[in-house]
Image: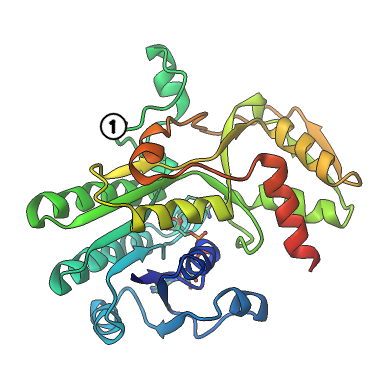
Amino acid sequence: MKVLITGGLGFIGTYAANRLLSLGHEAVTFDTLAGSSPEVAELLKGTEHFRGDLLNPMSLFEAVKKHKVDSIMHLAALRNLDSQRNPYLAFRLNCEGAINCYEAARVFGLERVVFASSSAAVAPKDFYDPLGFEELPDNPPLRPINVYGVTKAFDEMMGKEYSVVYGLSVVGVRLALIYGPGKKAGSKTSGWNDLIERSIQGEPMTQSRLSDLQVSINYAKDASEAAVCAVTAKNPPSATYNCTGHCVTSTQFCEAIRRVIPKANITLVDDGAKPATHGRFDTRRAKEHLGYSPVYSLEQGIEDHVKILSK
Ligand SMILES: NC(=O)c1ccc[n+]([C@@H]2O[C@H](COP(=O)([O-])OP(=O)(O)OC[C@H]3O[C@@H](n4cnc5c(N)ncnc54)[C@H](O)[C@@H]3O)[C@@H](O)[C@H]2O)c1
């Protein structure tokens, strides 16, 4: 199978392309960037690249036609904080960008579009607490928590419509917080990556206990595996799947870092911060329909992260 990955030179795209190749598939990275760092280029050895802009549908159509791809994995997006700062661009890249992928797949008769949705598209845990749910249900009502979540909810809904109206296979993977080497700095959740990467240097840090709220967190290789499972699965019947990883508090994450990196120098503080979190997601359908479940335990993910950065 040949898969075009929008945002293929980004954090998750790089791991997904590498994984597709290791499974014997082909990958074409589609990105506004011309190229990548030497480390990323090493991961992408064997892939093809098309420099294009998702905001220009013709550029995407040209890439699909030129490379004769079977499916699209759509990962390019404006991230959380940037979407909050610039809703107009968020709409253009995250919503129009997704529609451009659905259209390309419809026009060229592709097998499937897989896209990355987000926990931000659904209501946080406290919405469900009065209903007595221990895990966030797998087919929750869309109730976005911010601008970024609104754009991802749009992608989920429009994806469903393309399935209904055109019979196109559109599969969403609903991801939560992801850590791993290569994550962009300055995003809403990059602080979790900093905890690992600055601990390697033994730098002193303070981290909020986040009111001991549980956060869903996934290692990058597992998150990208979810997208790979979604693009390779045989006829998944559902539209969007919860594809999250482990559920931990900030304290538990820091303890795991200390176990892997004994010189970690993190001080936990009770600052009353209480972000909108989702707790544990029900991921049974992702396992059943896509064959996806995370492989890395928390410690294994942190160990792998440290190993890659130490190379
Ligand atoms: N990283 C996370 O913690 C996380 C969590 C939940 C969901 N997601 C979703 O997963 C997907 C991948 O996230 P990521 O962390 O790899 O993002 P990233 O920002 O690292 O990568 C995005 C890539 O898209 C490219 N891009 C931007 N605009 C483009 C355009 N107009 N045309 C073509 N390419 C363009 C960028 O150059 C970049 O290489 C996104 O859809 C994101 O919303 C990520």
Residue lying at 47% horizontally and 65% vertically, measured from the top left: 23
Secondary structure at badge 1 equals: loop
Residue 229 location in percent, x, y? 40, 53
Residue at the extreme front of the image, as rendered: 24
Report which quarter residue 104 is drawn in.
Answer: bottom left
Depth check: 148 or 228 in front? Answer: 228
Q: Tell me: 304 left or right of 230.
A: right
Q: Tell me: 151 left or right of 201.
A: left
Residue 218 location in percent, x, y? 57, 45
Residue lying at 77% horizontally and 59% vertically, measured from the top left: 307
Q: Tell me: 92 left or right of 108.
A: right
Task: Check mark 1 vs ligand 1: CB closer than 8 Å? yes or no.
Answer: no
202 versus 122 height, above or below? below
Q: Amino acid at mark 1?
A: Pro
| Quadrant assignment for the N terminus | bottom left
Residue lying at 16% horizontally and 74% vertically, measured from the top left: 108
Depth check: 272 or 168 in front? Answer: 168
Residue lying at 82% horizontally and 44% vertically, measured from the top left: 260
Depth check: 92 or 22 in front? Answer: 22
Residue 139 location in percent, x, y? 30, 32
